[in-house]
Image: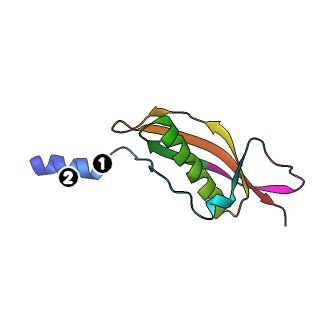
Amino acid sequence: MRWAVLLALLVAGCPDAAPQNVILTPQGETVQIATAAPDLGVYVLVGELRAEAMGVDADEATQSARNELRNQAAALRATFVTIDKNEGAGGGYRDRIRVILIGRAFRPKD
């Protein structure tokens, strides 16, 4: 019986754990965070993004989420990413803070 309970816990797993200490990739370093969408006459929207991260405090979690957002935008060959919604610091897992950022990625028109 004990093994059945253990197996059930392993299969169920932990709550989805967001990444911590997200490192900004060299490609992500080329993506700027913009406060407003760039001129759509010059830039094209290439995707809507969602970045989630955890940290020991709100600053660490936010920085990791920003890095994740920039890395995702870089994967789409974007040069700008906006942060349209900041879910802010919320409850996490095991004394960690969770932050979710929603944004849009843009690159110059071809």
Residue under label 1, please give it.
12
Image location of residue 66, percent across then percent down: 59, 47
Residue at 84% from the left image edge and 67% from the top image edge: 110
How many marks on residues? 2
Instruction: Please name the colour scheme applied to the rendered image.
Output: rainbow
| Residue 108 is one of the magenta-drawn residues | no
Q: Dot 1, how many residues are within 10 Å of its Cα: few (below 14), some (14-19), or many (20+)?
A: few
Mark 2 vs mark 1: which is more N-terminal? Answer: 2
Residue under label 2, please give it.
7
Q: Nearer the viewer, residue 32 or 38?
A: 32
Residue at 79% from the left image edge and 45% from the top image edge: 37
Image location of residue 64, percent across then percent down: 52, 48
Q: Nearer the viewer, residue 93 or 16?
A: 93
Could you tell me which secondary element the residue under label 1 belongs to?
Answer: helix
Image location of residue 18, percent across then percent down: 44, 47
Picture layout, residue 55 above or below residue 76: above
Q: Quadrant of residue 25?
A: bottom right
**The label number, if any, that marks residue 49 in the structure image:** none
The type of residue carrying mark 1 is Ala
Could you tell me which secondary element the residue under label 2 belongs to?
Answer: helix
Q: Give the residue furthest to the bottom.
A: 110
Image location of residue 61, percent across then percent down: 49, 42
Viewer can see residue 1? no
| Residue 38 is one of the magenta-drawn residues | yes
Judge from the rendering whether residue 9 lies leftward or rightward of residue 85; answer left or right: left
Residue at 12% from the left image edge and 51% from the top image edge: 3
Judge from the rendering whether residue 63 lies leftward or rightward of residue 10; answer left or right: right
Residue at 63% from the left image edge and 50% from the top image edge: 49
Q: Which residues are magenta?
A: 37-49
Viewer can see residue 80? yes
The type of residue carrying mark 2 is Leu
Give the distance between the C-alpha atoms of the residues marked 2 and 1, in whole angstroms.
Answer: 8 Å
